[in-house]
Image (cartoon, helix red, strand yellow):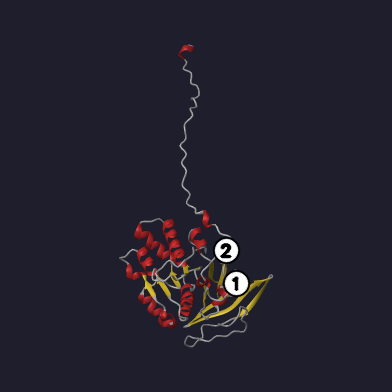
Amino acid sequence: MNQTQIKRRGRPSKKKVAQNVTYTPSLIDFSAITKLNNLNVDPKMMETMKSGLALDHFVSYEGGVPSASNMMIIGDPGVGKTTLLLDLLAAVQNKNRKCLFISGEMGRKQMFKYTQRFPQFGIVDTLFMSDYMNHNTKDVIEQALNIGYDLVLIDSIAEIIDGVRDDNNWDRKIAESWLVDVCVNNNKGENKTNKYTSFLLIQQVTKAGVFVGSNKLKHLTDAMLEMRRESDRNGGGTYLTFTKNRNGEAGMRMSFQLTGTQIYYGTIEIDSDGSDEELELEITNPEYADGFKTWNEAPYGDNE
């Protein structure tokens, strides 16, 4: 081959390209960095809301639901999550606290039948999302919470998030971030009455028993309560277990039973020094009709 016909292909020349470096303005106010011994918190934010149920000593060291906190309960459908938390909500409202039940799953007819079985639930202020099918779920929730409540039960967060997604054409992450922001803002008292709202959040699990939701949603919670129905091979029964609890003892286990119109709380088991300590606590709420309360031992203070 004639070398004059050969076209040399050398490496492309390396030209230095000027890079435009942009600097994002700082979004952090470093003056807000605080020494821990200089923290100043409103005493009302440190209060706990007592119900008079054995759940008080199960939920926190102080006894009761802490203000400005978020507790999530997970479990299989039909295991009793709504019944458990409505019992707690009704008992707290009965102690002159302002409470709200946001029902995203059950409508008026279902709840009417529910309160026929458990009359103590009748005092609970309830927002039925089925009444607002033609409204934006996001706006309804925000306006309701802006009234200001001590304790709010949402059943379930999956239904609320799905409604917000559909109404605003958002993906799941954006809808979950919205819910997190709503809870945090109300935790801080950003509502008309400056209530440091606490939330009880019900969430479903997959068939494998795995939590459904992002880590951001999971990290929102101060406490994660699992409700499981054990097989007869393992002794049967339904049990509550805290897998996470910033306000109380994680790993605590309590039996829970529904019989007819009564709600029974059995024993609390605490794994202490490698051994399980069983504490016989109350059965239902003494202020409710046909209810009674038995304390064989009250390890965390008075029997309130």
Seen at 47% across and 68% down, the residue is: 201
Q: Nearer the viewer, residue 100 or 166?
A: 100
Which is nearer the N-term, disc 1 or disc 2?
2
51 shown above or below 140: below
**C-alpha span from label 1 to label 2:** 33 Å
Q: Nearer the viewer, residue 233 or 151?
A: 151
Q: Residue furthest left?
A: 134
Q: Residues within 10 Å of mark 2 (few under 14, many from 20)?
A: few
Residue 246 at x, y percent in the picture: 57, 67
Q: Image quadrant of residue 195?
A: bottom left
Q: Amino acid at mark 2?
A: Asn
Q: Nearer the viewer, residue 210 or 38?
A: 38
Q: Are marks 1 and 2 in contact (CB under 8 Å)?
A: no
User: Element under label 1?
Assistant: loop
Seen at 39% across and 69% down, the residue is: 192
Q: Badge 2 is on which residue?
A: 38
Q: Residues within 10 Å of mark 1 (few under 14, many from 20)?
A: many
- As drawn, the label of residue 152 is none
Residue 38 at x, y percent in the picture: 57, 63
User: Element under label 2?
Assistant: helix
Quarter containing the C terminus: bottom right
Q: Is residue 230 visible?
A: no
Residue 33 at x, y percent in the picture: 54, 57
Q: Amino acid at mark 1?
A: Met
Q: Of circles 1 and 2, which is in front? A: 2
Q: Badge 1 is on which residue?
A: 252
Residue 267 at x, y percent in the picture: 59, 78
Seen at 38% across and 79% down, the residue is: 112
What is the count of numbered marks? 2
Q: Image quadrant of residue 37?
A: bottom right
Q: Is residue 187 visible?
A: yes
